[in-house]
């Protein structure tokens, strides 16, 4: 019996546990001005919507996290022209089980961008335009249970990111899954699922729930 137990233990691959973030107190949003937007100084900062404590609750064995508050760049920023300097939050994440990527980067990356904060009507218009810009036809509706649980007005799964709309705030959560060393996998991985798929369907979804819980 001891020999059998030992053989089974040798075949069992080490797994990286995943948790869930506890809902935090929602942020307070200012009233929109005549343009329909919140004053730029009153937009919710992306890193305030996804604080380090929430990320660590979802990724309890992460060894290193580097958090940067940034002004968004790329197609969305060019379209909107003016966005707050802290409308984007980039979080680098490392694990003991992850393969290094070099160039001073960390293996995993989480990126939250706030696209707009204003009236529900303006946020819906901006959301629809931006989803079409970043995803085109390569998108599907988010799971109904996620939309209901998070109280979302809209949500799309673009394969490598989630876009969201809730009560006048719209944005996107994307990033890069870490590549794990041979023999390691994320908790919840099923046959036929890669670690990158678990990162998107489990890790990123739980982070999105943490973000939307911060929105009133």
Image (cartoon, grey):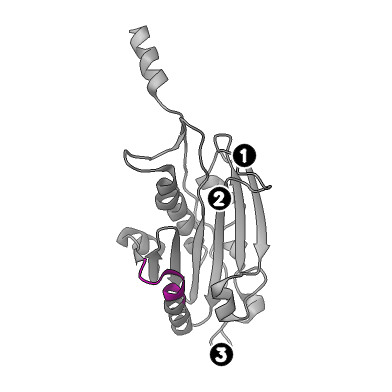
User: Label 2 to label 3, Cα distance in Å?
Assistant: 34 Å
Front one among 119 and 174 = 174
Q: Is residue 132 above or below residue 193?
A: below
- Label number found at residue 35: 3
Residue 108 place in picture, x, y as percent: 56, 48
Residue 133 counted in the magenta span: yes
Q: Quadrant of residue 31?
A: bottom right
Mark before the other along the chain sequence, 2 or 1: 2
Residue drawn at (39%, 67%), measured in percent from left and top?
A: 155
Front one among 183 and 209 = 183
Res. 68 in view: yes
What residue would you read off at disc 2?
A: 55
Mark before the other along the chain sequence, 1 or 3: 3
| Horizontal side of residue 1 vs 27, given as left or right | left
What residue would you read off at disc 1?
A: 63
Q: Secondary structure at mark 1?
A: loop
- Name the quarter where the N terminus is drawn: top left
Q: Secondary structure at mark 2?
A: helix
- The stretch of residues the image draws in magenta is 130-138
Residue 161 place in picture, x, y as percent: 45, 60
Q: Is residue 22 above or below residue 29?
A: above
Q: Are marks 1 and 3 in contact (CB under 8 Å)?
A: no
How crowded pointer 3 is (Cα within 10 Å; few <14, some 14-19, many 20+) is rated as few
């Amino acid at each position: 019996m001891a020999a059998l137990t030992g053989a089974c233990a040798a075949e069992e691959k080490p797994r990286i546990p995943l948790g869930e973030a506890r809902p935090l107190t929602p942020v307070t949003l200012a009233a929109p001005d005549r343009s329909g937007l919140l004053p730029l100084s009153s937009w919710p900062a992306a890193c305030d919507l996804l604080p380090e404590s929430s990320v660590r609750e979802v990724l309890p064995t992460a060894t290193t996290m580097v958090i940067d508050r940034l002004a968004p760049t790329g197609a969305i920023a060019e379209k909107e022209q003016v966005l707050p300097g802290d409308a984007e939050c980039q979080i680098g994440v490392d694990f003991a089980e992850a393969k290094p990527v070099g160039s001073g980067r960390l293996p995993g990356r989480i990126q939250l961008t706030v696209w707009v904060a204003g009236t529900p009507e303006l946020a819906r218009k901006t959301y629809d335009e931006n989803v079409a810009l970043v995803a085109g036809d390569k998108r599907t509706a988010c799971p109904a249970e996620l939309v209901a649980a998070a109280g979302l007005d809209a949500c799309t799964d673009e394969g490598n990111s989630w876009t969201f709309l809730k009560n006048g705030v719209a944005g996107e959560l994307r990033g890069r899954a870490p590549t794990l060393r041979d023999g390691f996998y994320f908790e919840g991985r099923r046959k036929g699922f890669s670690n990158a798929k678990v990162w998107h369907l489990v890790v990123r979804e739980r982070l999105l729930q943490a973000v939307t819980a911060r929105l009133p």
